[in-house]
Image (cartoon, helix red, strand yellow):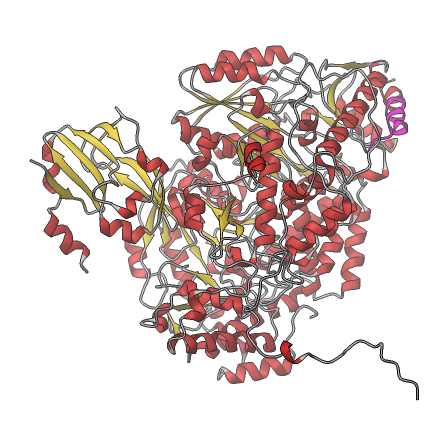
């Protein structure tokens, strides 16, 4: 059973067992505008919660993607290399960035649920 | 009488009057009269052509050790007539100060006097080598020394580093001097305070020097919040970086209090000199308490922007920072004349060397000619007219547009996009429509503190007539936006050599060099 | 004042329109104790007066064209066709801003795109940027870029790297945690230099920075160094201070260099006492998003017509602020225009001829000087510059040559200012502007000065 969490940095993580899939939110891609490049981490790289994992560049800005949890990268969405526009077209599905093996699910406790995130971005 | 019926018609045929000039058939060639569609040199040139006559090197025994370049390179050449044509045609697709008013805030696009160009090209300046013996370049050293003296006197500062290649390099120079001075004091201070309205180079430079940046809050009237600043000062604060007038075009009126507080806390005050045009000859930053400031000679001292450089960023330093200035510098030689101090040995405290040679000599000669032409009296008028012109434009536009801050602007004035609210027109569309009206756009979306910012700096070299014309164009555009004439903005620019370009596609699949068409593609045509 | 359009009447009327009676009212936010200070500088001067004063200063210098001239060491005197100066003085180029508004900047953007293509072709790299400040600052930027790519801290400076370039790298990394190693110069032994570089490469190494032709004029086997670097996943940064050499020598990119930087002054740009010059910067396509500086890229407009824009600008400081790839804003636009105009005139045929002409003259001078007593030529390989070991202090001899109206070269002691063991070394450069007469004069005067 998958659960979805959101960070205040406008990332989402879908958790299935001890694996998490991470991307940026619809709200984030709207703010960024047209995404032109995504720099992805290497598989097997380890990150602590809050580390810079990836970079997303739009015509307007370059932004860092932070690890929402500590863990090891187990897959990256190679398609984004050729088609960064997928982040705009399908941010919370086809436009995922990477999958991470979660060290400690306790890291999820300070993330938000969908409703709390909606409240955050509705102002 | 004899009737001569062979003259040419001189009237305008009826079919040529009225009508929409943009309508009608496109030209066969793609050219539009004086505006030519010009191919790349790789398309119009040939590897077999050269536009230079050179002596034949002949056969001889080389000493290249087997590293001879034997493969064809793929460079094309053009004959001299076609080189002249190619670049003349390209130039006609550019807007420059020579074309018209350039209201780019924080960029100081003023007239570039041709006298400066003439002087920089004197063989005694243009054709001397940086490593010639010092006694063969005394005139060049005197130029550097004299310009240094002018810049120090205009700022009331103790010393100057002349070698920085551009404004950002000057910032680096100032911040490295600060870091070196702290090290010399045996202190580990790491925090640099930068206002959110600062130019992006400020935080970039601070981080480059190993500092951490903390953002300074602004007050509602667009200036540094002095109380908040004082609360942030402490034993870890290395420096504050301020632009004055700030990037909203306002003078930081509490600047002396800010400087005193920073010094009290043991930090240094870096002033970004990008906006010195508002002060030159009128206010000396040294009297305001700063420790370092870079000049942008390509802004304040009229050396040409050249489509993005070369710039030049001499950096003045206070007594406290002077011992840490980078090499080289010019000093009086024992026994008369000038010499170049170019080595960091002998236990001196210079923080290092910023560039291979002595800085932008070609910009020094131009800047000195500019300063001498104006003199003390003329430079004061520069600042006064620059500020007068910005205020005149501000007053002219207040009816049609929304100014971000009420306070009196200095040499530039900040508007935001509130007047466009609900019109369906944004700052970008507004700026692009200004292109159609014959002007370069103003600075847009900077500073970040204003929504849809439009920062306007007319400079002192604009006449009242050209300011009036600019205000007229801006006012009419604002009225058009409010009247719902969105087509004027959505498709703008309509009359420029090209329409709006797809920068997204260009950034997603960057094509950064010409690739010849593949042979099969040619065959298929 | 001739550059200020307002009359006193204009000023009065404009102030009145603003509702103030004196211009100082516009400076009301400036502290009173800092306004209108008396500055000890002369008043304005006419165009004629300024021209006269500046011409007097210019006349105090010995310009290179007036004497037999052999200085190089990173700045070279080449003949620049008159067309080049005409082009860069066109007001639409000279007085344009950075091309952020592509619709009215296609002139600048197209020549930058052409420039990038020419530079990449010359350096043998896949891509090149739109220029940097000069060769030395480009070298420092390359070291920082290698650090970003490899995430390693150790940078190795070859012993034959221009002394001032090494100093600039040292200065830029002074307050970072990069570990820079400087190898000993080998003025007479390029093989020893190459071996020392290779010996330094280990698993911690981010990059090796190697100049060829090196500071002493020797050509190095970059391929061998590249292979050694790549075996340890380090990068080779190749430095070229005389870009005309690439008309005769296999480019560093073709020899495996990952980043190639060069001083581009030699094409289109005068000596100008050291600046403004032109940094060239090329690298592999896969590193393009780590490349510093501006780049122009191809784009289409709303009607589908080809045009050019500045692209990849999200890496720049005005957007990334403290996360920028470097703090550089300007490139060297007008110097790049001079470069590309000169190279368009030369074309491949002309560049090769120019390069071989330089080399032939250098060979000729080598043969002449090798016969001068007290002179030892240290080079077996060179392009248009080589090193002499003199019987006496080189700086002293250069001064003696000035007495004889010859600018005879650059003493190595001016480039390696911290060393005491290079005093007898003299760098001598020859370009197409040097005549047979000049060379014979140098040989004769050098013989007498050394006697």
Residue C2 position, x and y percent, is: 70, 69
Q: Nearer the viewer, residue B310 or A46?
A: A46
Q: Is residue C436 magenta?
A: yes
Q: Is residue C169 above or below residue B322?
A: above
Q: Residue lying at the far right in this picture: please name it.
A: B1
Relative to A108, B69 lies left or right: right
Q: Is residue B403 above or below residue B134?
A: below
At x 75%, y 37%, the residue is B49
Q: Main secondary structure of the magenta part?
A: helix
At x 55%, y 61%, the residue is B108
Residue B303 visible in the displayed image:
no
* Span shown in magenta: C433-444
Residue B357 visible in the displayed image:
yes
Residue B16 position, x and y percent, is: 64, 76
Q: Is residue C220 above or below residue C292?
A: above
Tell me the quarter of the image containing the C terminus of chain A.
bottom left
At x 47%, y 32%, the residue is C285
Q: Nearer the viewer, residue C394 or B247?
A: B247
Q: Nearer the viewer, residue C275 or B352?
A: C275
Tell me the quarter of the image containing the N terminus of chain A.
top left
Residue C110 position, x and y percent, is: 59, 48
Q: Quadrant of residue B195?
A: bottom left
Number of disc labels: 0
Q: Quadrant of residue C175?
A: top left
Relative to A90, B62 lies left or right: right
Q: Quadrant of residue B469?
A: bottom right
Residue C446 position, x and y percent, is: 85, 22
Q: Is residue C333 magenta?
A: no
């Amino acid at each position: 059973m998958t659960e979805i969490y959101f960070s205040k940095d406008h990332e989402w993580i879908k958790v299935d067992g001890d694996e998490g899939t991470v991307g940026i939110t619809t709200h984030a891609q709207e703010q960024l505008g047209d995404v032109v490049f995504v720099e992805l981490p290497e598989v097997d790289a380890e990150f602590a919660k809050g580390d810079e994992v990836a970079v997303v560049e739009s015509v307007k800005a370059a932004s860092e993607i932070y690890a929402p949890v500590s863990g090891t990268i187990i897959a990256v969405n190679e398609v984004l290399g050729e088609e960064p526009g997928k982040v705009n077209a399908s941010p919370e599905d086809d436009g995922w960035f990477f999958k991470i093996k979660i060290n400690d699910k306790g890291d999820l406790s300070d993330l938000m649920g969908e409703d709390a995130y909606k409240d955050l971005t509705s102002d | 009488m004899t009737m001569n019926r062979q003259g040419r018609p001189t009237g305008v045929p009826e079919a040529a009057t009225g009508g929409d000039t943009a309508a009608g058939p496109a030209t066969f060639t793609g050219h539009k009269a004086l505006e030519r569609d010009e191919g790349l040199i790789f398309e119009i040139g040939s590897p077999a052509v050269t536009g230079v006559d050179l002596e034949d090197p002949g056969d001889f025994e080389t000493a290249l050790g087997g590293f001879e370049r034997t493969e064809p390179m793929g460079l094309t050449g053009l004959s001299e007539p076609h080189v002249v044509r190619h670049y003349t045609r390209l130039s006609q697709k550019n807007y420059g100060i020579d074309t018209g008013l350039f209201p780019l805030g924080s960029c100081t696009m003023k007239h570039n006097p041709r006298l400066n160009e003439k002087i920089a090209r004197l063989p005694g300046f243009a054709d001397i080598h940086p490593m010639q013996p010092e006694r063969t370049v005394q005139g060049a050293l005197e130029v550097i020394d004299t310009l240094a003296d002018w810049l120090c006197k205009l700022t009331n500062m103790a010393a100057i580093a002349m070698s920085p290649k551009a404004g950002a390099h000057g910032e680096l120079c100032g911040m490295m001097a600060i870091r070196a001075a702290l090290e010399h004091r045996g202190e580990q201070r790491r925090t640099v305070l930068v206002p959110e309205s600062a130019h992006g180079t400020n935080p970039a430079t601070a981080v480059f020097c190993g500092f951490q940046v903390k953002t300074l809050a602004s007050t509602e009237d667009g200036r540094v919040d002095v109380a908040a600043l004082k609360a942030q000062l402490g034993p870890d604060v290395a420096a504050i970086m301020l632009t004055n007038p700030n990037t909203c075009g306002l003078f930081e009126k509490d600047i002396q209090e800010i400087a005193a507080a920073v010094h009290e806390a043991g930090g240094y005050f870096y002033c970004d000199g990008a906006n010195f045009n508002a002060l030159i000859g009128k206010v000396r930053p040294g009297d305001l308490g700063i420790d370092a400031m870079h000049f942008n000679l390509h802004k304040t001292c009229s050396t040409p922007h050249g489509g993005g450089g070369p710039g030049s960023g001499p950096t003045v330093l206070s007594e406290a920072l002077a011992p840490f200035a980078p090499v080289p510098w010019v000093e009086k030689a024992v026994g008369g004349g000038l010499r170049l101090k170019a080595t960091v040995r002998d236990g001196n405290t210079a923080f290092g060397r910023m560039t291979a040679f002595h800085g932008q000599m070609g910009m020094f000669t131009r800047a000195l000619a500019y300063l001498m032409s104006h003199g003390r009296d003329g430079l004061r008028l520069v600042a006064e007219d620059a500020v007068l012109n910005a205020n005149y434009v501000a007053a002219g536009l207040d009816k049609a547009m929304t100014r971000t801050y009420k306070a009196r602007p200095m040499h530039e004035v900040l508007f935001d996009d509130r007047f466009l609210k609900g019109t369906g027109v944004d700052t970008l569309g507004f700026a692009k429509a200004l292109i159609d009206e014959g002007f370069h756009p103003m600075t847009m979306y900077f500073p970040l503190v204003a929504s849809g910012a439009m920062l306007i700096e007319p400079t002192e070299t604009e006449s009242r007539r050209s300011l009036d014309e600019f205000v007229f164009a801006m006012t009419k555009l604002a009225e058009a936006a409010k009247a719902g004439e969105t087509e004027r903005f959505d498709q703008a620019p309509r009359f420029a050599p090209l329409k709006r370009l797809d920068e997204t596609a260009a950034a997603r699949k960057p094509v950064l060099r010409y690739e010849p068409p593949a042979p099969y593609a040619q065959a298929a045509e | 004042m001739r550059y200020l359009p307002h009359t006193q009447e204009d000023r009065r009327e404009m102030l009145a329109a603003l509702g103030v009676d004196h211009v100082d009212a516009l400076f009301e936010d400036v502290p009173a104790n800092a306004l209108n200070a008396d500055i000890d500088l002369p008043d304005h001067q006419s165009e004629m007066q300024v021209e006269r004063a500046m011409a007097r200063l210019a006349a105090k210098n010995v310009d290179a064209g007036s004497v037999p001239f052999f200085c190089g060491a990173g700045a070279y005197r080449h003949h620049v066709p008159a067309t080049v100066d005409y082009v860069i003085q066109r007001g639409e180029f000279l007085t344009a801003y950075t091309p952020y508004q592509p619709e009215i900047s296609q002139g600048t953007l197209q020549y930058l795109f052409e420039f990038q293509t020419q530079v990449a072709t010359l350096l043998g790299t896949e891509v090149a940027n739109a220029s940097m400040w000069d060769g030395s600052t480009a070298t420092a930027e390359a070291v920082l870029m290698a650090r970003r790519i490899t995430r390693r801290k150790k940078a190795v400076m070859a012993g034959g790297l221009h002394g001032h370039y090494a100093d600039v790298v040292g200065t830029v990394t002074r307050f970072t945690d990069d570990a820079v190693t400087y190898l000993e110069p080998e003025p007479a032994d390029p093989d020893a230099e190459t071996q020392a570089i290779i010996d330094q490469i280990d698993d911690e190494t981010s990059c090796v920075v190697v100049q060829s032709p090196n500071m002493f004029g020797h050509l190095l086997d970059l391929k061998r160094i590249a292979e050694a670097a790549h075996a340890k996943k380090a990068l080779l940064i190749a430095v070229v201070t005389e870009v005309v050499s690439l008309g005769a020598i296999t480019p560093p990119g073709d020899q495996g260099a990952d980043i190639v930087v060069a001083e581009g002054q030699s094409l289109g740009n005068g000596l100008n006492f050291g600046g403004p010059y032109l940094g060239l910067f090329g690298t592999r396509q896969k590193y393009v998003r780590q490349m510093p500086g501006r780049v122009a890229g191809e784009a289409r407009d709303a009607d589908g017509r080809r045009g050019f824009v500045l692209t990849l600008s999200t890496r720049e400081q005005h957007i990334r602020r403290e996360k920028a790839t470097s703090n550089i804003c300007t490139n060297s636009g007008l110097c790049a225009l001079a470069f590309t105009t000169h190279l368009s005139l030369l074309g491949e045929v002309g560049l090769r001829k120019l390069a071989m002409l330089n080399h032939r003259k250098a060979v000729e001078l080598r043969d002449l000087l090798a016969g001068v007593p007290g002179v030892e030529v240290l080079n077996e390989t060179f392009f248009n510059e080589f090193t002499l070991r003199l019987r006496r202090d080189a700086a002293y001899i250069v001064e003696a040559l000035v007495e004889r109206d010859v600018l005879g070269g650059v003493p190595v002691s001016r480039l390696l200012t911290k060393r005491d063991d290079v005093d007898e070394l003299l760098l001598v450069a020859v370009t197409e502007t040097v005549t047979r007469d000049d060379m014979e004069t140098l040989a004769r005067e050098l013989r007498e000065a050394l006697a």
